[in-house]
Image: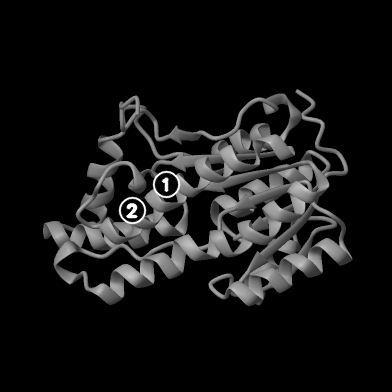
Amino acid sequence: MDLGLEGKIALVSGGSKGIGFACAKLLTAEGARIVICSRSPSNIDAALSVLPGAVGIAVDLRSGDDAKEAVDRVWQDVGPFDILVNSAGAAKRTPVHDLSPQAWRAAMDDKYFPYINVIDPVVKKMADRGSGVIVNIIGNGGKVASPTHLAGGAANAALMLATVGLANAYAGRGVRIVGLNPGLTQTGRVSEGMKAVAASQGISEHEALRRARDSIPIGRLADPAEIASVVAFLCSAKASYVTGVVINMDGASVPIVV
């Protein structure tokens, strides 16, 4: 299927590894011009080595000023972008007995604000231009409370609300905004999460991962490329009437309607 993304300009936050990198790679293959951003220059260099024609920017999106400066620079130097895919940042999984007010705040700083700090300048630029698509890769922790992911889940829940609320506000100005909630996906973040689960349950990380995998009805973790395929579709005109929703991709792990 030709998604019609040839020549589109896409900014992918967190595009140097994991799901973000998979999205950048697929959008590149579809002919889009890609800009990735990450806090790590070395991760950017590694990603750019396999993303022909892509541009990388090292920036800490936890800073609103730095995020806006990066957005403005891309808009001016590369061009007005048509697509924003947010995949930057992840809240540390913390067993409930280790939570503190500082941990709750850190979760918002690590996951919620890196998205909001980019979305705010981007959505306004897109609205002024009259077109654009924003896809926020969030996570199922915002729908189902986990004792090892309460703080991060709260940040995800806030992002889900911001996603649908902003979609409603900007739909009449030509901007679509969609959320995507992956379940367990084969990235480096899985092993970090399993450490917290193992510590809270008194089991090995290997056993924690086995139990997590066995709990997924489809029988396996997602591949980042599978998440990227849905993101690419959502970024395209094929999904021109999809906005203001958060889509689950969890292998039927959470069979709920709302």
Secondary structure beneath dot 1 equals loop
Q: List x then y, in percent, for residue 221.
A: 40, 40
- Kind of residue at disc 2: Gly
Q: List x then y, in percent, for residue 70.
A: 72, 70
Tell me the quarter of the picture where residue 205 sits: bottom left
Relative to 202, say whether 236 is above or below: above
Rounded to the nearest angstrom, the CA distance separating label 2 from label 1 is: 8 Å
Is residue 235 rendered to the left or right of residue 218?
A: right
Question: What's the residue at 18%, 71% (across, down)?
Answer: 98
| Residue in the foreground of this view, choosing between 140 and 167 | 167
Q: Are marks 2 and 1 in contact (CB under 8 Å)?
A: yes
How many badges with numbers are in the image?
Answer: 2
Q: List x then y, in percent, for residue 62.
A: 53, 72
Q: List x then y, in percent, for residue 186.
A: 45, 48
Tell me the quarter of the picture where residue 67 sits: bottom right
Question: What's the residue at 51%, 40% (across, down)?
Answer: 164
Is residue 219 rendered to the left or right of residue 164?
A: left
Relative to 153, say whether 237 is above or below: above
Circle nearer the N terminus (2, 1): 1
Question: What's the residue at 34%, 24% (across, down)?
Answer: 257
Residue occupied by mark 1: 139
Secondary structure beneath dot 2 equals helix
| Residue in the foreground of this view, choosing between 34 and 220 | 34
Q: Colour scheme of this structure image? A: one colour
Instruction: Give neighbour class at mark 1: few <14, some 14-19, many 20+ (Cα, 10 Å).
Output: many
- Kind of residue at disc 1: Gly
Residue occupied by mark 2: 153
Instruction: Give neighbour class at mark 2: few <14, some 14-19, many 20+ (Cα, 10 Å).
Output: many
The answer to whether any part of residue 4 appears in the image is: yes
Is residue 209 rendered to the left or right of residue 234?
A: left
